[in-house]
């Protein structure tokens, strides 16, 4: 869903003003709000169910880096839709979730808040791209160089790394 929102976010800016553009923006906003709700649910589940123990032998600094990257991902996945919601509110547009119900405005029309929220939305995208790239690179490093079960635990069905048994 995140990747789809990113692609649509770039494409919709280039669309000519038309009813189609309005529909694409509305869908982008609705899916962004859905992502916000799913992120909240995921955080609640994580608080309730806990997190898996690190793979045995993982250095403390790597455990801390993993926790920091997970924290950053959650902060971004909460802040990005909220910045979009704030931008929409400060732009003076109504916000409806898939046309079913309206959400409250986070701000009245305000050009300064609008500019701030748009800037935050864009910077959060850059932060998301960086954190996801580093996180993915670390998972691949664990799989192909360390040959541990880190990536296997994230992607069920992936065979254990060659040369080592799965160590869950």
Image (cartoon, rainbow, N blue to C red):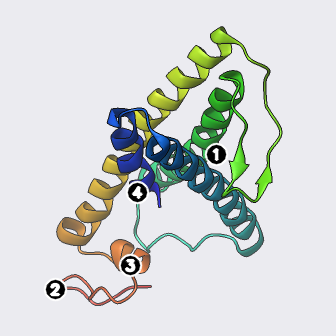
Rendered location of residue 48, percent (x, y): 77, 71
Say whether marks 2 and 1 touch (CB < 8 Å). Answer: no
Please state which of the two labelled residues, at mark 3 or mark 1, is closer to the viewer.
1
Q: Residues within 10 Å of mark 1 (few under 14, many from 20)?
A: some
Inspect this view and state whether residue 130 appears.
no
* Distance between mark 4 and mark 2 Cα atoms: 36 Å
Instruction: List the residue tagged with mark 4.
Output: 4
* Distance between mark 1 and mark 4 Cα atoms: 17 Å
Residue beneath the point at 52% across and 42% down: 22
Q: Is residue 138 above or below residue 13?
A: below
* SS of the residue under disc 1: helix
Viewer-closest of 106 and 40: 106
Q: Is residue 93 above or below residue 67?
A: above
Instruction: List the residue tagged with mark 1.
Output: 78
Instruction: List the residue tagged with mark 2.
Output: 163
Q: How many marks?
A: 4
Viewer-closest of 99 and 73: 99
Please state which of the two labelled residues, at mark 4 or mark 3, is closer to the viewer.
4
* SS of the residue under disc 4: helix
Sequence-first disc among 4 and 3: 4
Instruction: List the residue tagged with mark 3.
Output: 155
Sequence-first disc among 2 and 1: 1
Sequence-first disc among 4 and 2: 4
Residue beneath the point at 30% across and 85% down: 158
Picture quarter containing residue 76? top right
In the picture, which quadrant includes the C terminus?
bottom left
Q: Does 41 sit left or right of 25 as displayed? A: right
Q: Does 20 sit left or right of 129 as displayed? A: right
Viewer-closest of 93 and 162: 93
Rendered location of residue 103, percent (x, y): 80, 45
* SS of the residue under disc 2: loop
């Amino acid at each position: 869903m995140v990747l789809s929102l990113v692609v649509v976010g770039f494409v919709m800016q280039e669309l000519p003003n038309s009813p189609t553009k309005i529909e694409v923006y509305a869908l982008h906003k609705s899916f962004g709000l859905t992502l916000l709700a799913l992120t909240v649910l995921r955080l609640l589940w994580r608080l309730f169910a806990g997190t898996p123990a690190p793979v045995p032998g993982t250095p403390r600094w790597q455990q801390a880096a993993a926790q920091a990257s997970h924290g950053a991902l959650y902060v971004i996945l909460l802040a990005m839709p909220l910045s979009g919601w704030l931008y929409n509110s400060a732009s003076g547009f109504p916000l409806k979730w898939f046309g079913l119900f309206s959400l409250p405005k986070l701000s009245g029309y305000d050009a300064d808040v609008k500019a701030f929220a748009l800037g935050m939305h864009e910077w959060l995208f850059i932060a998301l791209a960086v954190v996801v790239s580093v996180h993915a690179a670390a998972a691949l490093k664990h799989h192909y160089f360390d040959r541990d079960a880190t990536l296997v635990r994230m992607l069920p069905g992936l065979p254990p790394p060659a040369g080592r048994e799965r160590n869950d």
